[in-house]
Image: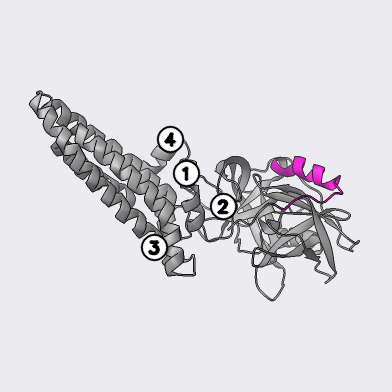
Amino acid sequence: MNIVDLLFLLIAALTAYRGYRRGLLGLVFELGGGFIGLLAGVALGPRIAGAVTDSAGLTGVMISLLTVFVLLTVGQTIGYIIGQRFASLAHKVKLGKLNQGLGALGGIVLAALTFWLIGSLVASSTLRPVNRALARSVILQTLDDSLPPPPNLLSYFSQYLNTSGFPQVFAGLPRSIGPPVDLPNNRTASRAIDAAAPSTVRITVPACGGTQLGSGWMVSDGAVVTNAHVVAGGENVTVQTQQEETVSAQIVRFNPRMDIAVLRLSDSVSAPPLRLETEGRERGQPGATLGYPGDANGRLDADSAAVQDRYEAVGKDIYGEDDVSREVYELRSEVTQGESGGPFVLPNGSVAGVVFAASTTDSGRGFALTGAEVVGEIDAGIGATNAVSAGRCTR
């Protein structure tokens, strides 16, 4: 139990008392008004923030959350005023005590649902200290395990708060991370890095009013695997190898739900293909992650890595709209923007997963799609020769 749990217990006690004083009928109208206010805040928050600041960073997030809080409070207040008229009617027909008892119970339910919804929204942000506290809350995790994913009507707001550049791995609260595994020794990590470095490429895509940078790896002669969010909304894709060979590429496979894409190079390169490993790897499996951070240096970054866990994660597609289940590796490895699409490589040189996101709770943690998850899309992409649409921009 942490500070978030203690805060919930305090709020639940206050709302239970308020529900007892106001009765169930008053609480129902207050809940309805608050829900309407919440919807208005979710719809208007990002727009108000966009009018005040050009950045979707911390300032924009705080303005959006403040808008939600204000409109939620206004809606609750209006609902309460209306509900009090019906509460008076309940007293007149001698339902006062029953109305009050149910009101106390309803107050606790209201507190739980509101706390869970707000927690799920905030978890979409990049506020790691806050997200870490949410992930370690026993009460919130219990609610998240018991309830369905948050409604999709909150997706637009969640996508606005998500300024990481990565898709949402979890549709609700982030999963609590267990004790860290040991990283491989330098010799083991170097074997993986040396095997994959010549085959890891840098991807540049002019798109969506800017330049999108990402990583990928050679899966066969002329075919590169990357993430869908790296190339979304783009057409003129450029691939650069570690040997500084630069070629254009077309997108021949694009799956925004899984977040996987396959590129067909316009010319041959010297980078050798890597083998995809589809056998699931368990906790402690050593390896390395490789990719090109999103900076102007264009340098290849390689980090030792180890599997922290492997599980099915219910998250969002690259647009933050539809729920999607992915089998992922939770990795102990640093992942930064630009490294999306890079390989998680085993010491034998095979690729066990495709890096696609960083943890929103802990630095030094990342996520990779497992080989078993992506093998079907990759095989289809290897055999494809015709260009496909890269969809729309993610923001």
Density class for disc 2 (Cα within 10 Å; few <14, some 14-19, many ≥20) is some
Which marked residue is nearer to the observer: mark 1 or mark 4? 1
- The reply to whether callout 4 and callout 3 are in contact (CB within 8 Å) is no
Kind of residue sitting beneath label 4: Leu
Task: Please say whether residue 338 is visible from this viewpoint.
Answer: yes
Left or right, residue 253 beside residue 312: right
What residue did someone put label 3 on? 62
How far apart in space, not on screen, are marks 4 and 3 (Cα)? 27 Å
- Residue 117 in the image: state x and y as whole percent: 39, 45
Q: Looking at the image, is mark 2 or mark 1 earlier in the sequence?
A: 1
Kind of residue sitting beneath label 1: Leu
What residue did someone put label 1 on? 153
Q: Is residue 261 above or below residue 375?
A: below
Label 1 residue SS: helix
Magenta residues, start to end? 373-390
How far apart in space, not on screen, are marks 2 and 1 (Cα)? 37 Å
Q: Looking at the image, is mark 1 or mark 4 earlier in the sequence?
A: 4
- The reply to whether callout 2 and callout 4 are in contact (CB within 8 Å) is no
Which marked residue is nearer to the observer: mark 4 or mark 3? 3
Q: Looking at the image, is mark 2 or mark 4 earlier in the sequence?
A: 4
Kind of residue sitting beneath label 3: Met
How far apart in space, not on screen, are marks 3 and 2 (Cα)? 35 Å
Q: Would residue 377 be counted in the magenta stretch?
A: yes
Which marked residue is nearer to the observer: mark 3 or mark 1? 1
| Nearer to us in this view, 49 or 351 | 49
Which marked residue is nearer to the observer: mark 2 or mark 4? 4
